[in-house]
């Protein structure tokens, strides 16, 4: 069979396949989608809240101002009057009369009208819970009370806020509707006749404190103090860690602390060290009274202290949860990428030599919940000698490095050499292409 | 009678010859067939990835701080052919980049015990080389061995740190030479080697052993490396 014959056969086969597919494609294009109309769009205006971005709910979201766990009836009752607001600014075209926000579990399609049937005294809420509706407003500031998320069935008193660690993921749907909806079982919402567009933002509750990091190993040093440790079994991908170093202490006793909420830690001694590793945290430890933070996984909320710097700060942190004596000290935060990544306290040159200070580490889940303190270990500032010191003390080693040329001249020399090499390679490539 | 027998013999021989002549006919096509002429793609470059132990500079100091850390120098080298020397090989130029790191816990000044912070020495060698590669044995015989001699100048960027502190950094420089023996892997599967050339223009792949000496002061060593090379 010649090549020409083969080509002809292949072309014929491709044409036949295209003809066979054409009706299918036409059907797909003309199917009436109760659903999604391409000309309707809803956009989340704030850059930090994007489609499918995760927003985490913490213990405070779940338990309200009490800070206890697990959730109790009292918590939920108080939660009904306490609203945690997540803010979405939504802009949408002028031809969209209504915008509604609905809450569903991760795999629930709230764009399906049958999933949005409302709760009545005799029925429980269906898969999606209505959060609110706006009409005639071009930029929507949406508030989502936590109660909507955690208390979806008050008749049964079944609270989902009972101590999960990312076990359930909820999705907020923002729907742009062409027609007004009616919340009634007899007359289900009529958006199936209209069209809508939806955006999703996802909430993942972590409403239990993470477990404590284990096997903390102190690493003394001259330029930095480090704590190495094993992650707890509850650690997840975005788990972070924070180290506490009591830099004002004059002695240290190792051991397990009595139940200590790291949130009660006091930044003591007029010293505060900032974030180490360049990864910002999402919420400060112990800011139990703050109910207005938007937890943001992109970490735009940054610490104001530079890494490794020690400066005055008499701020005392308090937490609604009253625990045993706090570990006083400064905190350092890190986001390890793997198990055992250390927290490092840099800029410790002013600390006295050979004085052990207590230190511990806490685990922080993606929602900002801190674990209790790990075992307390003793770490100290010590003077060290490294390779260069050893080399300078050895005449054989030191004299060799004395002959090293300066960075600038060597840089020029190597640059010239590499330039010649690059030219030679380029010439050869050109010659080869010609050949 | 004898005449009749002779006639029968002649007739039988004629039949046999005719039959054999008939059996040869289909072979004509095969006889006309000639295998395709294999033309290797042009070969102008070599790329080598090598690794080997490296004790930089003063061995006593290095071992006192880093113990048994042998560095493991990793090198990437590319050669470009300037002249194909007939019946010998290629004469070319090369560039080399390397990396080696030594680390250990620093020693406490008070009791010489190991502290918690690390002290490190990191080396980044750069070299410009002249290379004579002799592959006549592999090209002209069935022995798949090639040899190469290299000489050039090397610059080594070094950086010594302890904890968060940079103790020293700079450049050392000096002569570098090496001798390489390699075995080409084409013989393992010549069809695959051929396809590699047709699809990617990689003429040969080879496993190499190289002994070399860096005479850069403070960071030099005479040692060996193993690696993998590509000729393309």
Image (cartoon, helix red, strand yellow):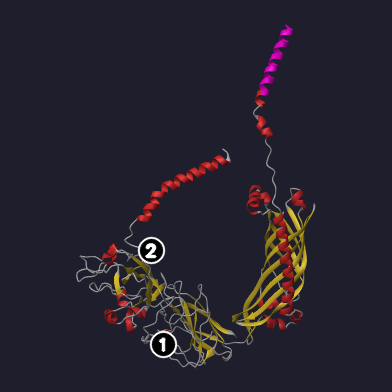
Question: Quick one: label 1, few (<14), some, or many (20+) residues within 10 Å?
Answer: many
* Quadrant in the rendering for residue A196: bottom left
Quadrant location, the N terminus of chain B: top right
- Residue extending furthest toward the front: A94
* Quadrant in the rendering for residue B95: bottom right
Q: Is residue B221 visible?
A: no
Helix or strand or loop: what does disc 1 sit on?
helix
Q: Say if the magenta span includes residue A386.
A: no
Q: Nearer the viewer, residue A333 or A122?
A: A122
The tag on residue A403 is: none
Marks 1 and 2, the one that precedes in the sequence: 2
Tell me residue A189's x, y (percent).
Answer: 26, 66
Q: Is residue A81 visible?
A: yes
* Residue at image coords 75%, 50%: B139
Tell me residue A422's x, y (percent).
Answer: 71, 66
Please state if B27 lies on the left or on the right of A119 as rendered: right
Question: Does residue A331 lie above or below A232 as drawn?
Answer: below
Magenta segment's dominant SS is helix
Q: Say if the magenta span includes residue B14.
A: yes
User: What chain does badge 1 belong to?
Assistant: A
Residue identifier under label 2:
A38
The tag on residue A264 is: 1
Tell me residue A169's x, y (percent).
Answer: 37, 70
Circles 1 and 2, Cβ within 8 Å, touching? The answer is no
Which range is magenta? B1-21
Please state if A81 lies on the left or on the right of B60 as rendered: left
């Amino acid at each position: 069979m010649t090549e020409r014959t083969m080509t002809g056969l292949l072309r014929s086969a491709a044409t036949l396949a295209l003809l066979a597919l054409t009706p299918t494609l036409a059907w797909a294009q003309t199917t009436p989608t109760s659903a999604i109309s391409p000309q309707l769009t809803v956009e989340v205006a704030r850059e930090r809240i994007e489609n499918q971005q995760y927003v985490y709910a913490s213990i405070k979201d779940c338990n309200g101002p009490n800070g206890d766990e697990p959730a109790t009836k009292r918590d939920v009752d108080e939660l009904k009057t306490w609203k945690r607001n997540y803010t979405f600014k939504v802009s949408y075209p002028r031809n969209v009369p209504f915008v509604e926000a609905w809450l569903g579990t991760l795999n629930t399609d709230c764009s399906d009208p049958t999933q949005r049937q409302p709760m009545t005294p005799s029925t429980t809420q269906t898969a999606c819970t209505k959060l609110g509706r706006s009409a005639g407003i071009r930029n929507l500031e949406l508030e989502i009370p936590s109660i909507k998320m955690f208390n979806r069935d008050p008749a049964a008193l079944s609270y989902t806020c009972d101590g999960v660690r990312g076990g359930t993921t909820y999705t907020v749907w923002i729907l742009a509707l062409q027609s007004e909806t009616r919340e009634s079982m007899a007359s289900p919402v009529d958006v199936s006749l209209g069209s809508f567009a939806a955006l999703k933002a996802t909430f993942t509750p972590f409403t239990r404190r993470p477990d404590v990091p284990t096997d903390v190993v102190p690493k003394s040093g001259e330029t930095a103090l480090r704590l190495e440790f094993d992650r707890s079994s509850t650690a997840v991908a975005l788990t972070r860690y924070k180290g506490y170093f009591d830099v004002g202490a004059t002695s240290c006793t190792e051991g397990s602390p009595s139940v200590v909420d790291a949130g009660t830690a006091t930044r003591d001694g007029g010293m505060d060290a900032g974030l180490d590793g360049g990864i910002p945290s999402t919420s400060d430890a112990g800011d139990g009274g703050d109910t207005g933070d938007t937890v943001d996984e992109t970490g735009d909320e940054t610490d104001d202290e530079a890494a490794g710097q020690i400066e005055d700060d008499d701020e005392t942190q308090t937490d609604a949860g009253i625990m045993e004596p706090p570990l006083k000290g400064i905190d350092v935060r890190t986001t390890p990428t793997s198990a055992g990544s250390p927290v490092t306290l840099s800029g410790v040159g002013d600390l006295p030599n050979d004085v052990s200070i207590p230190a511990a580490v806490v685990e922080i889940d993606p929602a900002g919940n801190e674990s209790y303190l790990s075992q307390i270990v003793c770490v100290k500032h010590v003077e060290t000698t490294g390779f260069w010191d050893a080399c300078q003390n050895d005449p054989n080693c030191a004299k060799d490095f004395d002959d090293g040329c300066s960075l600038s001249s060597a840089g020029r020399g190597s640059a010239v050499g590499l330039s010649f090499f690059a030219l030679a390679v380029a010439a050869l490539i050109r010659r080869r292409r010609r050949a | 009678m004898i005449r009749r027998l002779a006639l029968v013999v002649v007739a039988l021989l004629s039949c046999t010859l005719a039959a054999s002549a008939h059996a040869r006919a289909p072979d004509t096509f095969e006889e006309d067939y000639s295998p395709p002429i294999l033309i290797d793609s042009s070969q102008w470059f070599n790329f080598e990835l090598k690794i080997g132990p490296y004790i930089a500079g003063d061995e006593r100091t290095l071992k006192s701080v880093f113990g048994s850390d042998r560095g493991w120098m990793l090198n990437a080298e590319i050669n470009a052919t300037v002249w194909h020397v007939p019946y010998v090989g290629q004469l070319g130029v090369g560039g080399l980049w390397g990396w080696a790191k030594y680390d250990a816990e620093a020693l406490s000044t008070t009791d010489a015990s190991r502290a918690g912070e690390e002290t490190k020495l990191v080396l980044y060698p750069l070299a410009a080389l002249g290379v004579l590669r002799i592959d006549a044995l592999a090209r002209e015989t069935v022995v798949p061995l090639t040899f190469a001699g290299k000489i050039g100048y090397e610059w080594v960027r070094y950086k010594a740190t302890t904890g968060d502190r940079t103790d020293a950094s700079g450049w050392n420089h000096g002569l570098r030479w090496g001798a390489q023996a390699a075995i080409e892997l084409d013989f393992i599967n010549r069809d695959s080697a051929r396809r590699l050339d047709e699809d990617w223009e990689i003429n040969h792949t080879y496993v190499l052993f190289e002994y070399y000496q860096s005479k850069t002061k403070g960071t030099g060593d005479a040692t060996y490396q193993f690696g993998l090379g590509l000729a393309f």
